[in-house]
Amino acid sequence: MEVACVLRSGGQYDASHVEGLKKQVAHYMPDAHFVCLSDVEVPCERIPLVTDWPGWFAKIELFEAFKGQTLYLDLDTVLVADPSSMMNGYFQMCRNWVHPHLMTSAVMAWNGDYSHITRAFAEVSDRVMRDYVTLEQWGDQAFIAERAGKIFCFAGGDVISYRLQMRDRRGGVRMHRPPVGAKIVAFNASCPPWDGPKWARQWW
Amino acid sequence: MGAAMVVNVCVLRSGGEYGPEHVQWLARQVPGIVCLSDVDVPGIEVVPLEYNWPGWWSKTELFSGSIAGDLMFYDLDTVVLKPLEMPDRTTVLRDFCKPSRMGSGLMYIAEQDKDVVWNAWLEDPTGHMARCGRRGDQMFLDRYIGSAQKWQDIAAVYSYKEHCRTGLPADAVVVCHHGKPRPWQVDKPWIPKLF
């Protein structure tokens, strides 16, 4: 199995964040092949980004580069168990934790050739990058969800949100440890794992 | 253009021969499957059944809309060997014993087909259960989705009793047990153990 991440330089992420994710994958998925799609050097095997799609839109290159059983992880996700058992062979995304009819691309899995998504985006990239700025149609994840075909969501307890499920509305702690059964905890830009609780920041 | 979301789902009504262990057994073959149930199933996302219809009649709640999106439903005694290719429309079984009837052990339920079934069911659940008797939910569903596409026409879906007694067909994707013996009562290398 391949575990993929994406680093587009110039934003808030850098190669040190790839290093943290690499350590987690080596710990929980020792047989997996960890690869980063990036436009800069990274401390692991690298596939160069070939477009200039900015920020999270660079993730759409994943489907041209990976056509076998693949697990994609955002750089600000934290593994807390081996996630292999949550993959069902279909195209999978995270259900938005607040708006369950929408998909999130923080964690994705697929097994097969979905490069039609990349090709479709190449034809309409300017329009999508301009227009996909609403709640219902937000960024790369909305485009991927529209074009992937049938999408299965990861089970609710497998991928959890640190901000929305482990903290309360005022930012206080609701859960000190990820719940039993959770495999991945998704953080976000305003609260990255390297500034988070010890069980998360230990990897950086 | 929205997302075409599909949810793998099963149903467990407590008090019969099935328990949480059978849901967990199926979930090892279908990762992430959601269970409509009246009891908790450790490690599985459970959506509560809203009504108290007994046994297989609880399967009618698949059509209630309590789980949004298209549904890929598996009976709890289904052996899933490989991922089924998802169809583009509602798909049901052709009854393995009586081919003029439909089977409800493996169903792809398209979102747009839920309402007609659910509305008809809610008009008279007690009457439907009385009229269908031992033929169960399949007889009720036959009137509404019995003419849908059949799994056997698009995928290598087999019956254990009809096709697998002397060996598993090489192309098998799903094996339905539809009655005794249940998968956990049979010792075959291709059937996962219950525990």
Image (spheres, rainbow, N blue to C red):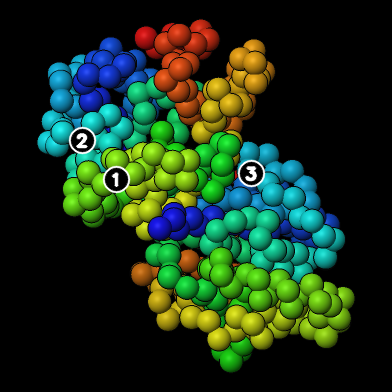
Relative to B133, A99 lies left or right: left
Q: Which mark is residue A53?
A: 2
Residue A136 in sight from this viewpoint: yes
Q: Residue at x 45, y 34 (%)?
A: A83
- Mark 1 nearby-residue class (10 Å; few <14, some 14–19, many ≥20): some
Q: State the quadrant of the C terminus of chain A.
A: top left
Residue farthest toward the bottom in the current orientation of the protein: B100
Q: Residue at x 22, y 40 (%)?
A: A61
Q: Position of residue B75 (x, y in %)?
A: 62, 64
Q: Is residue B78 above or below residue B195?
A: below
* Mark whose residue sits in front, 3 or 1: 1
The residue marked by circle 2 belongs to what chain? A
Amino acid type, mark 1: Val
Residue bearing the label numbered 3: B45
Which element type, helix, strand or loop, lies under badge 1? Answer: helix
- Mark 3 nearby-residue class (10 Å; few <14, some 14–19, many ≥20): some
Find residue B92 and report its image quarter.
Answer: bottom right
Amino acid type, mark 2: Trp
Q: Position of residue B89 (x, y in %)?
A: 47, 73
Amino acid type, mark 3: Glu
User: How far apart in space, not on screen, are marks 3 and 1 (Cα)?
Assistant: 34 Å
Residue bearing the label numbered 1: A128
Relative to A36, B192 lies left or right: right
Do the dots labelled 2 and 3 sit on one chain?
Answer: no
Q: Nearer the viewer, residue B25 or B111?
A: B111
Which element type, helix, strand or loop, lies under badge 2? Answer: loop
